[in-house]
């Protein structure tokens, strides 16, 4: 039998039993009620406060990820200012539920941030950045030398194309039934005669999928390439995660589409952009205004497709970049 004196016991049943039996408690019932109420109030206040703390921690993590820890020291942007924040926000890893808890990974898959770099926060003066400023500011020289860049997969192309659609507009080239990982529709026979693979010492490259005869069309970007203004291209770069933006700077060129015509930024959203350069090319367009490339000699199956980049003069200043 329990003692008639109420003990603050860990057992709830004991407490209940003791309260019922208690005729002259050493702690008055009123005091007990006040203490219980007070304790509840404290717990409630703590929980509410903790929730608020968690939210402000999250906010500073966001700011920290986007700015302080950014690979490039951009100034802090207004939280409401630019629409690239929407794109960038998708690359911020899910905020941790508990402080100090390791980020959760599904099936050990890399997060988008781990794959493509941290989101870029546009500085206030981003519209004045030249192509050169962007290339240097984003540390694209370092990225270009990285020999471990994987071949872009569908997830990559989908994000890359969607970011373009959101920030610049749809491109006719996106309608091609051939997936960008494989190329594009060259003609009635289907896709172009090359595939992508790592090219030792050059990063990713293109290789002949069959023997190609001298004079044959190897690549035709007339329909599969996209034309962009300098202003739109800058906006696109500032909407991408760092490594994707750097990839893009390597996959883009300037071109006049006719003699005396304006310069325009040209790029593509499929593997054709992975064509490496050489001063002994085997694939060239007939002139700098054309996007149709012919084999300059017989090319054996699995031989690398190489062009001479000098064919298209680099003139980003002529497109306002
Ligand atoms: C149009 S991209 C070609 C695709 C590129 N290799 C990639 O992995 O994204 C041009 C870049 O490829 C690399 N590249 C092209 N030709 C090269 C060569 N002959 N030797 C070394 N790197 C080359 C340079 O980094 C260059 O800026």
Image (tube, rainbow, N blue to C red):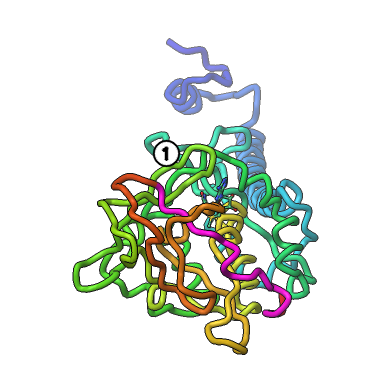
Query: Is residue 307 on the magenta stretch?
Result: yes
In depth, the one of 283 and 246 nearer the eye is 283
Question: What secondary structure is marked by label 1?
Answer: loop
In depth, the one of 163 and 198 nearer the eye is 198
In depth, the one of 104 and 171 nearer the eye is 171
The percent coordinates of residue 178 (x first, y second) are 27, 65
Give the magenta part as a residue range.
Answer: 304-319
The percent coordinates of residue 58 (x first, y second) are 64, 50
Q: Is residue 81 above or below residue 55?
A: below
224 relative position to 311: left or right:
left
The percent coordinates of residue 309 (x first, y second) are 57, 61
Classify the position of the C terminus by image quarter: bottom right
In depth, the one of 28 and 79 nearer the eye is 79
The percent coordinates of residue 107 (x first, y second) are 37, 36
Residue at screen point 75% across, 69% down: 130
168 relative position to 151: left or right:
right
Q: Visible in this render: residue 211?
A: yes
Query: Is residue 232 on the magenta stretch?
Result: no
Q: Which residue is mark 1?
A: 109
Residue at screen point 41% across, 53% down: 305
Q: Is residue 147 above or below residue 188?
A: above
Q: Visible in this render: residue 49?
A: no
Residue at screen point 41% across, 68% down: 293
Classify the position of the N terminus by image quarter: top left
Residue at screen point 29% across, 47% down: 301
105 relative position to 140: left or right:
left
């Amino acid at each position: 039998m329990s003692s008639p004196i109420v003990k603050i016991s860990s057992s709830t049943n004991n407490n209940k039993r003791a309260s019922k039996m208690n005729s002259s408690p050493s702690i008055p019932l009123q005091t007990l009620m006040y203490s219980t109420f007070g304790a509840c109030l404290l717990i409630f206040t703590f929980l509410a406060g903790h929730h608020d703390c968690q939210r402000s921690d999250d906010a500073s993590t966001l700011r920290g990820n986007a700015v302080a820890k950014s690979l490039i020291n951009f100034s802090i942007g207004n939280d409401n200012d630019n629409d690239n924040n929407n794109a960038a926000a998708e690359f911020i890893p899910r905020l941790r539920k508990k402080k100090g808890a390791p980020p959760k990974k599904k099936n050990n898959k890399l997060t988008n941030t781990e794959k493509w770099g941290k989101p870029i926060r546009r500085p206030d003066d981003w519209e004045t950045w030249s192509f050169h400023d962007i290339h240097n500011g984003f540390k694209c020289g370092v990225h270009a030398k990285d020999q471990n860049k994987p071949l872009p997969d569908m997830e990559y192309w989908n994000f890359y194309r969607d970011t373009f659609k959101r920030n610049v507009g749809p491109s006719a080239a996106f309608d091609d039934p051939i997936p960008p990982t494989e190329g594009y529709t060259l003609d009635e026979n289907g896709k172009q005669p090359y595939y992508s693979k790592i090219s030792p010492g050059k990063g990713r490259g293109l290789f002949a999928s069959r023997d190609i005869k001298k004079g044959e069309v190897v690549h035709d970007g007339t329909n599969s390439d996209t034309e962009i203004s300098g202003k739109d291209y800058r906006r696109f770069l500032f909407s991408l995660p760092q490594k994707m933006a750097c990839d893009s700077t390597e996959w883009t060129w300037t071109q006049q589409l006719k003699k005396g015509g304006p310069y325009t930024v040209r790029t593509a959203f499929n593997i054709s952009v992975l064509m490496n350069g050489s001063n002994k090319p085997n694939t060239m367009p007939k002139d700098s205004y054309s996007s149709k490339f012919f084999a300059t000699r017989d090319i054996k199956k699995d031989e690398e497709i190489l062009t001479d980049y000098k064919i298209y003069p680099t003139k980003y200043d002529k497109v306002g970049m």
